[in-house]
Each structure stands twice: as structure tokens, then as C-alpha cells.
Amino acid sequence: MSPAREPTKHRAQTRRSDTVCDLRAAIRRAARQEQFLEVVSAEEARARFTRALDLSPLPATTVALAAALGRVLAEDVAAPIDVPSFDRANVDGFAVRAADTVGATDTAPRRLRLNGEVIVCGHAPAITVDAGAATTIATGGMIPRGADAVVMIEHTELIEDEDGAPAIEVRRGAGAGQYISYAGSDIARGETVLRRKTRISSREIGMLAACGVAEVAVVRKPKVAVLSTGDELVAPGGTLAPARVYDSNGAILVAAITEAGGEPVSFGALPDEESAIEAAMRAALAQCDMVVLSGGTSKGAGDLSHRVATKLGAPGILVHGVALKPGKPLLLAVIEGKPLAVLPGFPTSAIFTFHAFVAPVIRARAGLPGETARSIEAEVPVRIPSELGRKEFVLVALVPAESGPAAFPLAKGSGAVTSFSQADGFLEVDALASSLDAGTRAPVTLIGPDVALSDLVIMGSHDVALDIVLGTLAERGIAARSIAVGSLGGVAAVERGECDLAPVHLIDPATGVYNAHLIRPGVALVKGWRRMQGLVHRPQDARFAGMDATQALRVALADKTCLMVNRNAGSGTRVLIDRLLAGARPSGYSNQPRSHNAVAAAVAQGRADWGVAIAPVAKLYGLSFLPIAPEDYDFLLRESRRERAAVQAFLALLRDPAVREKIRALGNDVAGG
């Protein structure tokens, strides 16, 4: 070895030595952490947390009426004035003395001279209504002195008396108080118009404004600090480098805290450095009433949050580990009376544990009542396996089935950002159950106030062109639910009657024909469009320069360093791939993601060198595309649903020239579709 290379080797050995030391230190830290991870039930975790907290509403603060919407009154509000504050007319007509109209009829009218005044809103009357007189008055006008009734203009006729002076004939008698709202008839001075603990809506705003109240005492919103931890986090809008992710949890929690009645204070995303996390948590506790941190709760080397929490004050950590799925690593602490919650880093786990343990504390401190869960009973169409010993919450989409609502599990996992937003509700699997069997009827706890079954349900393989059709439906007021379960999942769903249409692209290995073999009694095939499949690679990969797909495949199979990304078994693309490989198993064959996008991402990011995907996806990821063969993306239709208005609208859009042109613009073939 040349002397010039020895320092390089020495530095490499030093780095390896440092890495080994770091790993050993991490293992020791994880071992020390064991004492904190005592997994308890959700009920026990909630009880420990609430016992250590003051859950009474926070002290009052005064806000302007314009800022009071949604706030909770801290004190009773008594009316400082009468509403209305004067006697006023309820109709357009004439202010009169009721005694002057007794016996008036069309055949025997009563004549009254007309005062030379017109009373309109906002002007106090100047002339007294004497016996035998009347004053013109508009709706809302102040009743003049001497008058005790109002006659409608429709029950009078304008005339002139003997002297040519204006007068009216009253053709219907008026009782005392007719068409008059007396002072205080709506709200009386000193009356309690709103009571403490009332949540102020637009109606209450109107009442307070009518009383002249310009500011009101409300329960102070709890200030809730929001922190995210992780070296991988990037603020939304920033540049996303390899292995980095956007901090979605921070945004989700800020919004969820606002919804729960709190005032979020964002501290941003922090690196996985104990000193930085400790400094931020101490600052958050000093400035806010509560602290919510996401990430850093797992039992592992990267778990820094629990170590910081042990230093912050008494009583400290109360719970670290809850028998829930998702949400097991939850940490709950109280620091000098202030709640501290460290939520799991995965989005679904974070939002579940937030709503279960943190939101009730925020609502209590904001003076809001606890939320009452709404639920409906639904049939579970597929078996849901579960882990013994942990109560599991399963997010579901509600779809109309033949026998009523069906709860279809959303199987994206706790790391998926979209799971919670796309769910209609969740069902519980008991800790002592290993599964929830297909056909079980179970209560589904609804998420959000506006859960309604969709007009159209589509379950199967997703395609970006499908979004064009569904977007057009939405513009026409038709609510469609699309659940991506793959082609085979769609076939099963349409056969069970859980959807109206199932998008599929499955080739019959025996005939090479797409989708026709999926037709069943009661299930028809509706043609969609054709998508070109091809070999994708990075444009700068010189190994494939100037080649067609056949040549590129030959090069890829011959080069052991050329890494493939496959597709999942059962997909139409996988059938095509296996036919092309003819039994070969190139490097990367076992890497089998479930979508064209995942294939393209793996190639674009350099985790693989080639794969098979469709042309529109290759374009999205900036990849070179070598055509292989088209595939048919069609729809299985549940015949019993064909005549439904939403289904007819969908089928019409498949034939709509404007929609077809948009689908064609993505690189698809709709000729004859």
C-alpha cells in the first residue's frame, strides 16, 4: 500500500470505530429506557394523566365581540338595556289611538286627520297623537306620544277632509297594542341573556350586539406548544432531499389543536439532538399551558424525548407505552402542573393518540364540553387480523352495500398521511381478539360531523386518469369514493356488492386478453382506456442509451449490478413482467411494491435501475420510457347498480369528448374505449 493512502485508511478505521461506539452507546441507552416502557391499558393511561391534571377552565380574558365567535363565556351576561329600547311599530301604517278606531268597517270607516309628520327609523317623533288624529309611521319607527296602536296601511284609505287637509279613513278597528313591540319585549334590562359556559355562535353574537355589548369575558384558550422531532423533517415548502420527509405532523397538530379549542404555538421541527430538544421543551413549557411533541417515543436508540422529559420537573412521566394499535409508544407526562404529550411519529398514530388523550384536556381547559362520539353499525366485509394484547383501532371507509353500510378497512398503515383524512370512522378490535371475522357487524365510531355515504363507490386499481373523471363528477355535485385496493381487491369487492365499479387491468395468462375473463353473472365489463407499459430507467443511465425495450431488458439481465424493482404478485404488470423474464430472477426481483408510482420513485431515487411502469407515471418522475405493450384499464360494473343516477353519470363521462381528450393528454389511448 502506498504511503499516500495510509491516512485515508486510518480515517476510515476511525470512522468505523466511532460508529461502533455510537451503536454500543445507543444500545446502553435503550437498555436504560426499559424502565419507562411499562405498557398499560388505554383506560389506565387516561386515568393516570387526568388524576395529575387540573381540568377546570382557564381564567377569563376579555375579547372584542368580533373575536368572540367559538369562544366560551366565562361569566353570565346581563342585558344593559331593553331590547327594543323603545316602543316601535311592527308594520307600515299609522300610529293612532285605539279608541278612535272602535267599530270601524268598510261600510262605516272612522275618519282621522293626518299629522304633518312621517316617523321613520332612527328619528324620534315630535308630534303628539291627539284624539281624532293619526301619524304616518314606518316599520321600526318609534311610537309617538299619545298613540297606543298601529293600523296597517292596507286597512286605510288616504282622503282629504272638508278643509282639504290630508286625512285617512280607517276601515278596520284596532285594539290597544296592535302591531306594537314594547320596550323590553325581546330582552329586558337586567335579564341574563347568556350564561357562563355557553359557546358563542353567530346567534349569540347577534344577541350581544343587540344589547350593545362590544366586548365579552371568555375562557382563555389554552396555549399549546407544537414541536416535531427528527433529522429527516423538512418544513413544507422547503427542498426535499433524499431520505427526508415533510413535517406533516406539525401542520396536522396545529389544525387539530385549533379544532379542539386551543391556541397552537408552533416551535417547528427539531433535529434529533438532546440539547436542542431539551431547550425547546423548556421554552415551550415556560410560554405555554401544554406541550405536544410528535416523534421520539419509540423504544430505541433514537428515543430522546423521554430522557428529556425526566429532567423537566415533577411529577414527570406518568405513562410510556399504551396497549393500543396504533399508538403504543405514547408518552404522557405532567411537568409542574402542565401536560406534556409525546406522540408517535407516524401520522395516523399521532392523530389517534392526540384525539384520544390530548384533545379532551384542551377542551376541558378551554371550557368546552367533551365530545360525544357518534357511531353506526356496519358490516365488516373482510377479515381483519389483530395483535393479541393490544386494543386496535382500524380506520374504515363506509360504503353502501346490499345489506346496508359496510366498513372497509383502509390498510395504508400508521405511517400514511392520508389514512385519517380518508376515513369515515374507526372500529375497535378488542385486545383479547386475534381478529375481526368477515361478516361481523360492529359499531363504527364516526370521525367528523359530516359523514355521509357516497353517491358512487369505486374500489380497485387507481390511475391518475380516473381522477379526471371523478373530478368532473364532483363539479356536478356527485360525491364519489375511490378506494385503492388493487385489481384483485376490486374484483372481490364488486362481487360482494361493496362497490358500484371496480377498475381493473388483469391479463388472462392463457389468452393474453385483459379483463374479459373477470366477467361473472351480475358483473359486466365497461371499457375504459389503454395505458402503455414500458421499461423505465434514469435518462443518464448510459447502459440503456439508444436501446428499445427488448435490448434494454437483455442488457439488464446480463448485468448483475443492474438492480430491478418488480411489482406485486397478482397485478397485471407483474404478469407481464414474469412473461418477459421467462423464469429469470434478476437482482431486485423480490422488491415488489404495489404501484407504478412506487416503481418510478425507486428508479428515480437510484434505489433501483429499471422496472416496468406506465407512460404517464414515467413522465411524472422524469424517467426514460421504452414501450413494451399496452394494457387495458377497464371497469367491472355491478349490474344491479347500473341504473343508479351516479353510475349513469360516470358511464356518460367515459364517453364525453372533453373528458376523453383530457385522458388522452396524459398519454393514454381512448380510441374505441
Image (spheres, helix red, strand yellow):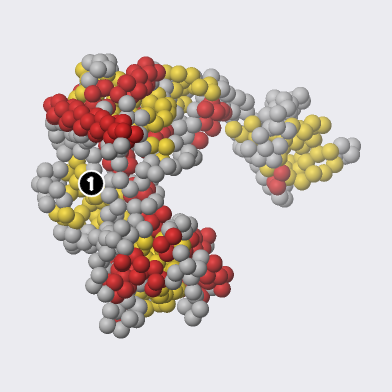
In the image, what residue occupies the spot 71% across and 50% down?
A: 106
For residue 397, which quarter of the picture? bottom left
User: Mark 1 falls on what kind of element?
Assistant: strand
- Residue 482, can we see it? no
Q: Could you tell me residue 108's position as x and y percent?
A: 72, 47
Which kind of residue does numbered mark 1 sit on? Phe
Neighbour tally class for label 1: few under 14, some 14-19, many 20 plus, Cα within 10 Å = some
Where, quadrant-wise, is the N terminus in this rendering? Answer: top left
For residue 115, which quarter of the picture? top right
Q: Nearer the viewer, residue 200 or 447?
A: 447
In the image, what residue occupies the spot 25% across and 33% down?
A: 13
In the image, what residue occupies the spot 52% across and 27% down?
A: 67
Residue 175 vertical position relative to residue 400 in the rendered view, above or below:
above
Q: Could you tell me residue 652's position as x and y percent?
A: 49, 73
Residue 152 vertical position relative to residue 265 in the rendered view, above or below:
below
Q: Nearer the viewer, residue 366 or 397?
A: 397
Q: Is residue 221 left or right of residue 46?
A: right
Q: Nearer the viewer, residue 449 or 634?
A: 634
For residue 519, which quarter of the picture? bottom left
Q: Nearer the viewer, residue 90 or 495?
A: 495
Residue 541 vertical position relative to residue 186 in the rendered view, above or below:
below
Q: Could you tell me residue 417's position as x and y percent?
A: 36, 46
Q: Is residue 552 left or right of residue 6?
A: right
Q: Is residue 641 left or right of residue 10?
A: right
Residue 497 vertical position relative to residue 41 in the rendered view, above or below:
below
Q: Residue furthest bottom?
A: 511
Q: Could you tell me residue 603's position as x and y percent?
A: 38, 56
Q: Residue furthest front?
A: 2
Q: Residue furthest right?
A: 163
- Residue 321, can we see it? yes
In the image, what residue occupies the spot 43% across and 58% down?
A: 541
Q: Which residue does the numbered mark 1 point to in the structure image?
A: 393
